[in-house]
Amino acid sequence: MPSAPTSARPSLRDLLPGQRRHAGAAGPSAARCGCDEGRRAGVSRRSVLGGALAGAVALTAGDAATQVAFAEPGYAGDTLVVLSLRGGLDGLTAVAPVGDPDYYRLRPGIAVPASVALQLDGVLGLHPALAPLVDLYRRGSLAVLHAVGMTQANRSHFSAMEEMERAAPGTTLRTGWLDRMVGGTGSGSVFSAVQAGRSMAAASLRGPSPELAFGRLEGLALRAMNNEKDRRATALRAMLAGADPLVAQPATTALDAVDRAGALVAARTATADAAAQAAKGGTPVASPPVVYPTSDLGQSLRDVATLVKGGTGVRAAAVDVGDWDMHVGMGAATDTAGWMYGKLADLAASLVAFAADLGPHLDRVCLVTLSEFGRTASQNGSGGTDHGYGNAALVLGGGVVGGRVHGTWPTLAPTARVGGDLAVTTDYRALLAEALVKRCGLSPSTVFPGQVTPTEGVFRRR
């Protein structure tokens, strides 16, 4: 990062002490296996202004008082939440093909035993750590797809992430597909596109449409004590009053956004405090808050739910969770202290809390899990798997045709595999295209260049 210019005039950063910015570090799995889960970050005028200003103008949520109205004319579609499982989820463990005889031949030491799998159909079963998802599946709010991925195998973290988030193979288009999705919905609010859980947006949000990236909603707060918050906000707005619109507009928008976020967090905190008092014998709370896992994933989904319920106009939300690159020591399916078991248990608990928290709002939310590639069909000699191809995906929402497995299972027979790995029978863009058409009211060509034929039957039309 270039050093800050020296100047006698105080900068926005000078007036906002304590703001911590980071570009995202590799997950723990990088240290375990030597793979770098980092991502190249796109630098643009938008990202410099939006990141430096929107990230820096932060408020202490508890004393934010102003609520800003963010009207959403012209968009009546779902909030599309993309949950990226960074590092390469082992879909053959998460959604195990326990009815495929080649599965146990290829993975004699790490395969999920059929006796503990949560059977979905005649072939596939959920890992036991995903048991909390069974109720959502049976209620029709959760669907499963297998053999999902890109049309061409790519086993490099960097280039696979880049290509998946660009979603424009064979073209020179450099924007991210979520940015194009948001741009296709017309003008919206500052919350139209958000990255929750990190202060640098994913490559899928790269492009001309502005996005708001934050670590936690509580972090959208001026680092000030007591009544200094108002003084700092006033000083910032005064500085911006005569500034070039190129700088003033995004900065003022950011200040408005943090006021709104602060009000939402303050209300959320008040509800939690009231529930805590009720637990001690105080006045009962009509709607006690949903308890999320304390993990980064759980807290990021909690923030997304808060924005959706708060009517901020979120159209696209990106959430990342890493540490899926399990080359070594994945752990047995029955090992509750194992690496994979712990990751899947957190994923399940976070998704269940997210659905419960949204309540009726789940009807206008569509969440899709994606990972840059799957894992090798065969286990390696270190109790893990290496970079593979086809993968599993979960789809959650009120508009999902749930309670079933979609797509085509290609089998793990030698002649069916690609480079020895699970083949891809569903282009991930086709899955997303169906969501865009049926839930977001967009044409696939608005987002994906070339010919992308949507899947059929995964979503209900709004």
Image: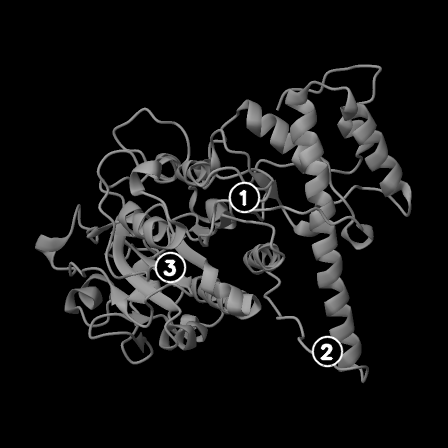
Q: What residue type is labelled 1?
A: Ser
- Do the numbered discs 1 and 2 sit on residues whose CB atoms are within 8 Å? no
> How many numbered marks have been drawn onto this rendered protein structure?
3
Q: Percent x, y for residue 411?
A: 15, 61
Q: Percent x, y for residue 259?
A: 74, 46
* In front: label 2 or label 3: 3
Residue topped by disc 2: 285
Give the mark nearest the N terminus, 1 or 3.
Answer: 1
Q: Which amino acid does label 3 sit on?
A: Arg
Number of other residues with Cα within 10 Å of mark 3, as a class: few under 14, some 14 to 19, many 20 or more: some
Q: What element carries label 3?
A: loop
Q: Name the residue at 21% across, 68% down.
A: 104
Direction from residue 156 to residue 360 in the image, left or right: right
Q: Name the residue at 58% across, 35% down.
A: 23
Q: Percent x, y for residue 421?
A: 21, 51
Q: Residue 255 carries which label?
A: none
Residue topped by disc 1: 192
Give the mark nearest the N terminus, 1 or 2.
Answer: 1
In the picture, residue 257 is in which quadrant? top right
Q: Name the residue at 78% across, 48% down.
A: 66
Q: Which amino acid does label 2 sit on?
A: Val
In the displayed orientation, state which residue is furthest to the bottom. Answer: 281
Residue topped by disc 3: 462
